[in-house]
């Protein structure tokens, strides 16, 4: 089985839990996902099956969109509502204060990775440093916040919509927003509503998949690359991963097929085409 399925991950499960369930339901161990969601989060989890697991590095580069909630007045060690409270403050901000900070953070900047995350530092995952009460310098990554839209502000809850680049931690963004507002705050809820072109509306719950009520997507359904059926004189060269002359005038990437089977993705490289992914 080869394909892609958009799962609507429920709150309380890890992304790995979802993959494990799919392994059993679909009867295959070769399944991966293209962007981790914390247990507190729900929504779009793009899963790839069989040979399509080779597409992970392409798909993880997609932008992501979320609806998030901030609980004001408390800060936690995990940067979300599941953690231990480490500080509190009185909520005394206005809607205009929030809008100003949202405007400030609609940009590219160096974001500090959360301590409770799976990022490796010196060969050890950060959450292991946290669990062992070991001090560690948290790395920073360049991220881009494309859009920040306030949905509502009621008492001590801010709800907003955000579009971000690969590698952005919404927990860290919330921490930065609250620091700028000079108030304690932590992530209260998170829903991923879109990854690339994959939306929450086209996703399937695990129960749907169990009941065989889902659509498995083919590469041509979600990659906007030109599709070319290979002629007989080129099939062996492509199967062997050789470069070929760009006789097709490709200026980006191309999906090569042969007898209606996916063979490879090639990309333009000056005068020729070189293999990117072999199926």
Image (cartoon, rainbow, N blue to C red):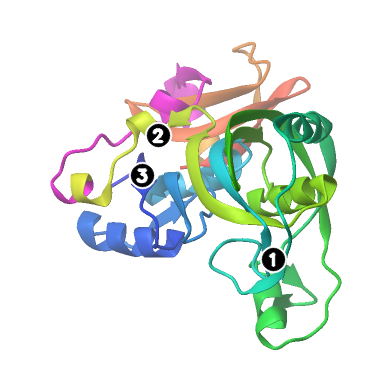
Earlier in the chain: of badge 1 and badge 3, it is 3
Residue 76 image-quadrant placement:
bottom right
Q: Nearer the viewer, residue 150 or 147?
A: 150
Pointer 3 with pointer 2, Cβ within 8 A: yes
Q: Secondary structure at mark 3?
A: strand
Query: 175 or 267: which is nearer to us?
Result: 175
Q: Nearer the viewer, mark 1 or mark 3?
A: 3
The Cα–Cα distance between marks 3 and 2, rounded to whole angstroms, is 7 Å
* In the rendered image, the vertical position of residue 252 relative to residue 124, given as above or below: above
The picture places residue 267, in percent across and down from the top left corner, at 65, 28
207 left or right of 256 in image: left
Per the rendered image, the range of residues in magenta is 209-236
The residue depicted at 51 percent of the width and 51 percent of the height is: 189
Reading the chain from its start, which is encountered first: label 1 or label 2?
Answer: 1
Provide the residue designation for mark 1. 119
Identify the residue position indicated by label 3 in the image. 8
Identify the residue at the far bottom of this view. Answer: 132
Q: Is residue 138 left or right of residue 225?
A: right
Against 78, residue 275 (above or below) is: above
Residue projecting furthest to the left: 211
Q: Is residue 175 magenta?
A: no
- Circle 1: element type: loop
**Is residue 228 on the magenta stretch?**
yes
- Percent position of residue 162, x then y: 62, 34
Labels 1 & 2 near each other (Cβ < 8 A):
no
Within 10 angstroms of label 1, few (less than 14), some, or many (20 or more) residues?
Answer: some
Q: Secondary structure at mark 2?
A: helix
Q: Is residue 241 visible?
A: no
In-image side of 18 versus 77 (left or right):
left
* Residue highlighted by disc 2: 200
Q: Nearer the viewer, residue 88 or 169?
A: 88
Query: In which quarter of the view is residue 11 placed?
Result: bottom left
């Amino acid at each position: 089985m080869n394909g892609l399925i958009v799962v609507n991950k429920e709150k309380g499960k890890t992304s790995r839990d979802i993959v494990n369930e799919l392994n059993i339901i679909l009867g295959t161990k070769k399944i991966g996902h293209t962007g981790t969601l914390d247990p507190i989060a729900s929504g779009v989890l793009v899963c790839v099956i069989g040979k399509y697991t080779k597409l992970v590095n392409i798909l993880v580069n997609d932008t992501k969109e979320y609806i998030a909630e901030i609980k004001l007045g408390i800060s936690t060690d995990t940067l979300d509502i599941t953690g231990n409270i480490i500080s509190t403050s009185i909520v005394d901000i206005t809607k205009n204060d929030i809008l100003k900070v949202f405007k400030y953070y609609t940009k590219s900047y160096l974001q500090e990775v959360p301590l409770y995350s799976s990022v490796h530092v010196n060969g050890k995952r950060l959450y292991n440093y946290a669990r062992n009460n070991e001090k560690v310098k948290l790395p920073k990554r360049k991220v881009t916040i494309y859009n920040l839209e306030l949905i509502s502000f009621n008492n001590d809850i801010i709800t907003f919509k955000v579009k971000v680049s690969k590698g952005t931690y919404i927990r860290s963004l919330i921490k930065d927003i609250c620091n700028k507002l000079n108030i304690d705050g932590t992530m209260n809820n998170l829903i991923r509503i879109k990854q690339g072109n994959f939306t929450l509306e086209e996703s399937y719950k695990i129960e749907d998949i169990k009941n065989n009520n889902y659509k498995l997507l083919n590469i041509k359904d979600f990659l906007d690359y030109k599709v070319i059926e290979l002629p007989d004189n080129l099939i062996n060269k492509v199967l062997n991963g050789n470069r070929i002359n760009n006789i097709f005038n490709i200026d980006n990437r191309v999906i090569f097929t042969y007898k209606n089977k996916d063979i490879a993705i090639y990309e333009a490289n000056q005068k020729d085409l070189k293999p990117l992914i072999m199926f």
